[in-house]
Amino acid sequence: MNKIIVLFLSIPSLLSAQSKFAQLDQLLPTPNEYRNAAGAPGHNYYQQKADYKINVKIDDIKQILSGDEVITYTNNSPDRLDYLWLQLDQNVFENNADSKLIDVERMEDFNSVDAVDKKKFYYDGGFKIDEITTVSGQKIRFSINKTMLRIDLDKPLLTGENVSFKVKWWYNINDRMAVGGRSGYEYFDTDKNYLYTIAQWFPRMCVYNDISGWQNKQFLGKGEFTLPFGDYEVNITVPADHIVGATGELQNSDQVLTAEQKVRLKQALTSDVPVIIANQEEAIGREKGCTSETKTWTFKATNVRDFAFANSRKFIWDAQGVQFPTKTVLAMSYYPKEGNPLWERYSTKLVAHTIQTYSKYTVEYPYPVAISVHSKWIGMEYPMICFNGGRPELDGTYSEDTKYSMWGVIIHEVGHNFFPMIINSDERQWTWMDEGLNTFVQYLTEQEWERGYPSRRGPAYLITDYMRGDERYMSPAMTNSESVLQFGNNAYGKPATALNVLRETVMGRELFDFAFKTYCERWKFKHPTPADFFRTMEDASAVDLDWFWRGWFYTTENVDIAISNVKAYEYKGNQMIENKFNTVSVKLNTEFIGDVLNRTRITQTVNERDKTIDDVYAKENQKNDTLPKLTKEDLYAKISEKEKLRLKDTQLFYEVSFTNIGGLLAPLTILVTFKDLTTEVIRIPVEVWVLGQTTVSKVFIFNKEAISFRLDPFLESADTDLDNNSWPAVTELTRYQKYAIKISNEETRRNMSNFEGKHVPRTKK
């Protein structure tokens, strides 16, 4: 009897173990002719092609971008297409964009002058589409839904056919210092000049594939971009004294470069150290001018998924050649004098090191150039070009954190050329497939740049604080980009750590590196999915990894392999106090396995080979720098006086909280009544609940006193309890009051009818 009981009690744990080792077949899509069971493209795999011929102009006086493009779209799918979808990502800056309305806010978010200024700042963003026509000029029917544009074809686009059409548009370029954004402009008040980093700047084709049909999920900010490959020819017109860097190869250097710049550029191609193409003295000279003349720079790019560029009269420009078996790549950097001495010293060398190291672990870098552009705060990636932060102080000093932050962001963003610009995953759906894989190879690249590089992510011990956290505030890695909790840990840190665990512990470096490179080679210039990655890693290694994918990517469980305590600490006041126990202290080897192996596997790092890399912050035996060291006290002294001021704004703030008691989701419609009895209707999309909270809050700023807030004032959401919809509380209305509201609502609805889907103006009683 006792044995039977023991066996019976063991069944649940046995089943639990079996479920953790169960195969992923029921979770992964069924293999087919497009994507096979080995994780490779199937025998009938297809992808669409989108080619662009674009003319674009930057107005440096009004900060307006205007352009026209001819898109040629080729249907390689087996399907008939009755309409086409394009992305209008710039519409995220419209004043009433969903991305702004669904932000959950608290009063503590507005404890600085800059935070309040950003909340109040009005910017007329978004694409202004002038017309869409055939190449011959006939108008084409189209419809815009927020960040997506649908073109209705006169006749279906059949398999193997292509269609060309023309789009003309413009928009106000966003001030990144005021409204943020992945691109835009920065204004330098000291010399009255602008630096433009331009991306998401033209209507772009969506992806159509065998997985999701049209990938036309709205752009809300976090889920990035999913784009088809194609060929680009772009004419960029800017003030004649601006320097331009862009995706692709410059076609008309004779028209836009000086004779001396052309000589320097030719020298750079065969140089293994950066050559200055446009130096700081020349840049300072250009800063003093403001010509009304223009130049047009022409670039061509083949087989890329996007196009970005940067321009300014402030740019210093340097380049060096990077030798590959089949070609020489120009690694280049563009930066204002405010980036020096860091940028001239490090940026292009980091670009060269990154594309060399990534090529070793993934695929050989296929493009002719790789560019790093300096812009304050931002790190963002595009084919062949990226925008990176890391700015010294005005006197040229910099902290150790600033240096490592700059090194890390350049490696990371240049690395994005491989994930997802070449191995082209669906960023709108799966952030971890580009950010996680890229962060993993970033870690490998950092360790080969400097021995003992203090990488932020990658080694397993760096993720343990997150993994032991409250599971209520976590989401599995296999979560849509917009719904991810703790974005950095989930999409960057955890998947990068998982791959490191696979490489160092589960598979070993040789098996892992072969399988990982196989995945990259299979899916370069194609559109892989998570299933393709999971299956390829197993197929190329003969290691059953279903249990690993299930645990690391489909759950929020954490690893907890127990050993008895060795030391314990208790946090008291501002000190970490060690408690003594009556046990034998055991000395643990706390060195990360990757560091141990790298001592012999990495024969020489870049800083060991290049003696100009180490600076004042390097190890004592490596210092060769004469720059003064910047202390934390120095940094504090440099904080802007604006940041030290307390808020003196007389605007009225209202934090309104909303609790989902019933559970069924609904948008929020709020009627605000002010002391002067005027009213304002505010509409917030249902995505405000996207992170799964039961309570959310919004902060509203008004210039007059609000006396009441009413939720669902038009009885449009089927709210079952109206008694809790008002603040101050209002009991159930009488039939007369309901009749009065009905009449008022009808008038309000008439006023609102012309603004459906747009900003709703204030209505007055």
Image (cartoon, rainbow, N blue to C red):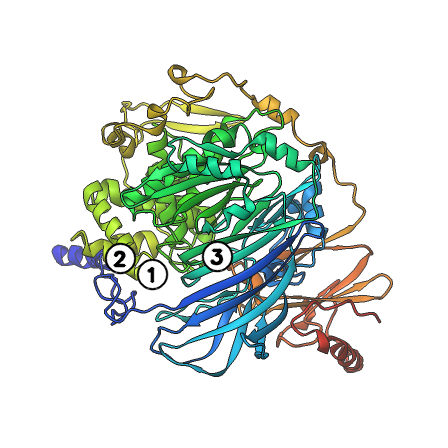
Q: Is mark 3 on a helix, strand or loop?
A: loop
Q: Position of residue 70 (x, y in %)?
A: 52, 68
Q: Quadrant of residue 681?
A: bottom right
> Residue at horizontal 35%, vertical 62%?
527
Residue 526: mark: 1
The disc labelled 3 sits on which kind of residue?
Glu
Residue receiving disc 2: 522
The disc labelled 1 sits on which kind of residue?
Lys
Q: In this picture, is 500 found above or below 5?
A: above
Earlier in the chain: of badge 3 and badge 2, it is 3
Other-residue count near label 2 (Cα within 10 Å), few / some / many at <14 / 14–19 / ≥20: some
> Residue at horizontal 69%, vertical 44%?
291
Residue receiving disc 3: 224
Q: Which image quarter holds the C terminus? A: bottom right
Earlier in the chain: of badge 1 and badge 3, it is 3
* Near-viewer residue (560 or 311): 311
How far apart marks 3 and 2 lie (CA) works out to: 23 Å
Q: What element carries label 2?
A: helix
Q: In which quarter of the image is residue 611?
A: top left
Q: Where is residue 2 in the image (x, y as percent from the top left)?
A: 14, 55
Q: Is mark 1 on a helix, strand or loop?
A: loop
Q: Position of residue 66 (x, y in %)?
A: 63, 60
How far apart marks 2 and 1 lie (CA) works out to: 8 Å
The disc labelled 2 sits on which kind of residue?
Arg
Relative side of 517 to 743, left or right: left
